[in-house]
Image (spheres, helix red, strand yellow):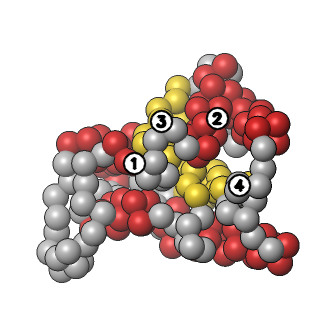
């Protein structure tokens, strides 16, 4: 199976990147073909300065990333919940995809595909932990993934990143690696 892992964290060496590498390691161990895309490495302008009326062309790296996502049978989207929402980098990337007509049949975006959303969360109250991750991921899966042809979307979240130590993070990395082995 061809899998693409998209990291929407704006910083290098983040826990989101560690989760992405763990998923990729697990999937590769089972013989899957895996590409990891760090959005921060792409050279696109995440701000729609001209709005949706005028098209802003994609640079070559971003266009290649769009093709990788389109050809993949399964995609994994990983990002931190910042101020209760997706990072601007990820939101800008998604807007570029829609604005540039990149989501087309020739890019493979109409096939039935599966996706996994993994989010990390700051220190939240117990009530916020129940609702915030699912509200943020539900919107992304409905507003983008389903429109782009992803029919099976699974979600998981890892809360209290500010308070959790290395031992708990290692457990989470093992969990995500197991998800990669199962390609879910």
Q: Which residue is mark 2?
A: 23
Quadrant the N terminus occupies: top right
Q: Tell me the element at label 1.
A: helix
Query: Whole-percent x and y of residue 81?
Result: 59, 64
- Label 2 CA crowd tier, 10 Å (few <14, some 14–19, many 20+): many
Which is more foreground, mark 4 or mark 2?
A: 4
Q: Which residue is mark 4?
A: 161
Residue 36 is tagged as 3
Report, in whole angstroms, how far the alpha carbon at label 4 lies from the one at label 3: 23 Å
Q: Which residue is mark 1?
A: 39
Quadrant the C terminus occupies: top right
Tell me which label, 4 or 3, sits earlier in the chain: 3
Q: Which residue is drawn at the image coordinates 46% and 41% (left, top)? A: 12
- Label 1 CA crowd tier, 10 Å (few <14, some 14–19, many 20+): many
Q: Which residue is drawn at the image coordinates 60% and 37% (left, top)? A: 18
Q: Which residue is drawn at the image coordinates 34% and 54% (left, top)? A: 105
Report, in whole angstroms, how far the alpha carbon at label 4 lies from the one at label 2: 19 Å
Residue 164 is tagged as none
Q: In the picture shown, does residue 132 fall above or below 71?
A: below
Report, in whole angstroms, how far the alpha carbon at label 1 lies from the one at label 3: 10 Å
Report, in whole angstroms, how far the alpha carbon at label 1 lies from the one at label 2: 17 Å
Tell me which label, 1 or 2, sits earlier in the chain: 2
User: Is 171 situated left or right of 95 in this image?
Assistant: right
Query: Whole-percent x and y of residue 82?
Result: 56, 67
- Label 4 CA crowd tier, 10 Å (few <14, some 14–19, many 20+): some
Which is more foreground, mark 4 or mark 3?
A: 4
Query: Whole-percent x and y of residue 175?
Result: 79, 38
User: Is 174 situated left or right of 103 in this image?
Assistant: right
Mark 1 in CB contact with mark 3 (< 8 angstroms): no
């Amino acid at each position: 199976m061809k899998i693409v892992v998209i990291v929407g964290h704006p910083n290098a060496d983040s826990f989101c990147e560690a989760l992405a590498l763990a998923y990729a390691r697990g999937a590769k161990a089972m013989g899957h073909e895996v590409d990891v895309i760090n959005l921060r490495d792409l050279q696109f302008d995440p701000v729609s300065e001209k709005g949706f009326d005028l098209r802003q062309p994609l640079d070559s790296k971003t266009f290649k990333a769009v093709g990788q996502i389109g050809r993949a049978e399964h995609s994994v989207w990983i990002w931190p919940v910042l101020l209760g929402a997706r990072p601007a980098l990820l939101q800008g990337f998604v807007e570029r995809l829609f604005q540039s007509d990149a989501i087309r049949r020739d890019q493979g975006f109409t096939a039935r595909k599966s996706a996994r959303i993994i989010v990390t969360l700051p220190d939240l109250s117990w009530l916020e932990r129940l609702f915030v991750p699912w509200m943020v991921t539900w919107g992304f899966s409905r507003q983008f993934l389903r429109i782009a042809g992803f029919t099976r979307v699974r979600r998981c979240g890892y809360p209290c990143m500010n308070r959790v130590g290395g031992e708990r993070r290692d457990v989470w990395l093992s969990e995500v690696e197991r998800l990669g082995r199962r390609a879910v």
